[in-house]
Image (tube, grey):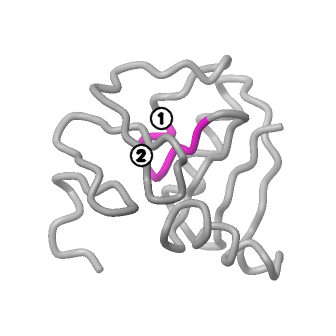
Amino acid sequence: MNRLFVIDSCQMCYQVKQYLKGSNVPYEEINLFHVSHAAKELKNKVGEVVTPVLFTRDDIYVGDRIFTATEKIKVIGVHSTGKNKQGNTMHLTSGSKLTGDHVVNKHDKGRN
């Protein structure tokens, strides 16, 4: 089962949930504010605590990269993939790169 990590009042989390529902992609929602171990799991597997994150059977999609997933979790428009320090596949879109253990894209400049 796909697992979607979200938090309350997160606009992108809401948009991703609507996208996945509209694409008939099944998922279990895991809210970091309500599931005590969720943040630790994200830190261990992604390298940081960030939302939204979609775990599929084989891959991890972070942030707006989730929009590249389809009903069968095929990747559309992804230009490359990389592995983080934990060995998980991270999908990269144009203008992004894998640095250390997380994905940085051109829109992340100045973000902590």
Residue drawn at x 23%, y 48% is 97
Number of numbered discs visible in the structure rendering: 2
**Residue 39 placed where, x, y %?**
67, 76
Q: Quadrant of residue 101?
A: bottom left
**Is residue 84 found left or right of 45 in the rendered image?**
left
In reply to whether residue 84 is colored magenta, the answer given is no
- Span shown in magenta: 59-67
Q: Are marks 1 and 2 in contact (CB under 8 Å)?
A: yes
Determine the residue positioned at 81% across, 82% down: 36
Amino acid type assigned to the residue bearing label 2 in the image: Asp
Disc 1: which residue: 67
Dot 1: element: helix
- Badge 1 local density, few (<14 within 10 Å), some, or many (20+)? some
Q: SS of the residue at dot 2? A: helix
Spatial separation of the CA atoms under disc 1 and disc 2: 6 Å
14 vs 94, left or right, is right
Label of residue 64 in the image:
2
* Image coords of residue 24 (percent x, y): 73, 24
User: Looking at this view, is 93 or 80 the one in front?
Assistant: 80
Q: Quadrant of the C terminus?
A: bottom left
**Picture residue at 57% right of the left edge, 44% below the top:** 60
Q: Choose between 18 and 86: the one closer to the eye.
A: 86
